[in-house]
Amino acid sequence: MSIVIRHRRQPQELPDVDDFEIVDVSVPVPTGNNIKVQSIYLSLDPGLRSKIRDIPDDAIKHQTISAYALGRVMDPGMTNLSVGQLVRGKWGWAQEALVPSPDLEIVDEQSDIDPADELGVLGMPGMVAYVGLLDFGQPQPGETLYVSAAAGAIGSMVGQIGKILGCRVIGSAGTNEKVTRLIALGFDDAFNYRVTDPEDALKKLAPNGVDVFFDNVGGPQLQAALDSMALYGRIVCCGSISTYNGPPSGLPLYGLRQMVTNRLRMQGFVIWDHYDRSADQRSDMLQWIRSGALEPLRAVTAGIENTPAAFIAMLQGSNMGKTLIKV
Amino acid sequence: MSIVIRHRRQPQELPDVDDFEIVDVSVPVPTGNNIKVQSIYLSLDPGLRSKIRDIPDDAIKHQTISAYALGRVMDPGMTNLSVGQLVRGKWGWAQEALVPSPDLEIVDEQSDIDPADELGVLGMPGMVAYVGLLDFGQPQPGETLYVSAAAGAIGSMVGQIGKILGCRVIGSAGTNEKVTRLIALGFDDAFNYRVTDPEDALKKLAPNGVDVFFDNVGGPQLQAALDSMALYGRIVCCGSISTYNGPPSGLPLYGLRQMVTNRLRMQGFVIWDHYDRSADQRSDMLQWIRSGALEPLRAVTAGIENTPAAFIAMLQGSNMGKTLIKV
């Protein structure tokens, strides 16, 4: 038997462990172009919360949670994969799964790289940080980069890539422990947004303004950044985790007038549009990890049965870096 | 003697005629590199209202209103200009003025073009429409363009250029008379935002979403557009006239989350940065006027003493097209 985590019902605001169900299933021998995989790591992403919010309860009930996972081929079926090959796919929060061959990506396993990073720095969150910062933020050496949710999977990479590119990097996070960790990671400055008002912090830490704001949270931090942007500043809208559990309309923003007076550019993006950049991402990220310039932060919890609790804790901001379940 | 219009005091919210003073002055014979000019047309721009809002009352009192004007050289002084030459500059709301030579632009007078257009289609508002739409909006043939304040100096040009580029064009304006005029100008659809809620109107008129929103007004119309943008939509932030007379923070916006999910780009700009495009603007605009593809809308009031009242009326939305005083 094999464990899968499914939706029991649509969560109300912050999800509860009872919104999930842990079920034992039997995964059959693969037929057709299916491959049987065994998970090593499951990915926990904040975006899941917003993705399900508009799905009717009936449509979500008893569905396996959709998420990236990393695993090994248990049974290649009629395909030409080999048993034990490292593969990545969106088979979700499941110990074992049958996955159609086109939905599986063969991972070029690196002996000196933790396979967990294939779901982090080398996976989708790494892609978001890479494309969002390089292609949309377009930071120049000497510019000031501000990252919200800077201790998260994406934020911690954005800040470190900013340092590699020669920026002055400021991060915000929700605990003093995270702030300390960001400074240790090489951030020039960091502040706890629960203690210091972001607008006051940015006035002090970026007196000449923020050139690039990489926004993972939306809401009041986006407001503060709008009030602190330098001329020709760029705001990369990556996510708005601050609004995922709230009402659909989100929090109000004031002062979009600065868009005009400060010649700002605000750009939202969704990573699915940018997979043409994945070879560049992999090559640069591997080089940066190996040179020690980029340290992958991971928050790994053991045991698939702990996945719902770890997901909820992540939404509450308890984690640093990429949140993963080691199955 | 010659009339100038000056600030009497900083306006509170909507300006009042008593915020201005009409003064008789004597403009001396030019010395040094100064040129004496006589105004033909004065430009009335909504942007003036926002420009002065943060200037202290003491600093503004008795200052001549700064604005574009078109005129002829009365006395070239020691420069090599000729009497009667057509010139443009920012000498403000004045019947006559002494202008330093570097601040004067010699206008290449066109026998078949109304000189008033040198302050409109061929002047700064034309430049804003041209650069904002072409360089930032980047509309493609067949795309849907939505323009707010569409009967204004800038909006009426943006919509017409959109038609020239092959877009479907929707405009909003504040009176039924303006709406009728927009349709006559070639807009595909137009609505009165005081009668029809912009969000409802856009849902009906742009069921597949707005590809390019050229925003002159901010506030609720920006909100409505955010809720109506198509995937990869572009919002050009040109101005926010709806907020110029209100509190500095402006009106709140909700739902910036769409920036991410719909991959939107929002771009503010200030025209001073883009004068490298002025030769292109002049050449394209002249061609479009001469072919009849672009009709310059003008709202001309005679008499310099009527300038304050005409300016206030413009801020209240009474005009169509470029507001000018014929001196």
Image (cartoon, coloured by chain):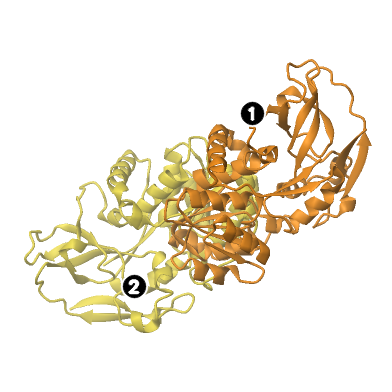
Chain colours: A yellow, B orange
Percent across and percent down for residue A14 are 48, 74
Using a 10 Å C-alpha cutoff, classify the residue at mark 1 as few (fewer than 14 neighbours), some (14 to 19) or many (20 or more).
few
Q: Chain of mark 1?
A: B
Residue underneath mark 1: B108
**Can see residue A54?**
yes
Q: Position of residue A61 (x, y in %)?
A: 34, 82
- The amino acid type, in three-letter code, at marker 1 is Asp
> Could you tell whether A121 is left or right of A217 in the image?
left
Whether residue A202 is visible here, answered yes or no, is no
Residue under disc 1 on the same chain as residue under disc 2: no
Using a 10 Å C-alpha cutoff, classify the residue at mark 2 as few (fewer than 14 neighbours), some (14 to 19) or many (20 or more).
Answer: some
Chain identifier of the residue bearing label 2 in the image: A
The residue under label 2 is A306
The answer to whether residue A238 is left or right of residue B100 is left
Is A146 displayed left or right of A4 in the figure? right
Image: B242 above or below A210: below
Q: Secondary structure at mark 1?
A: loop
Q: Nearer the viewer, residue B6 or B125?
A: B125
Q: Position of residue A216 (x, y in %)?
A: 48, 57
Residue drawn 46% across and 64% down?
B209
Q: Amino acid at mark 2?
A: Asn
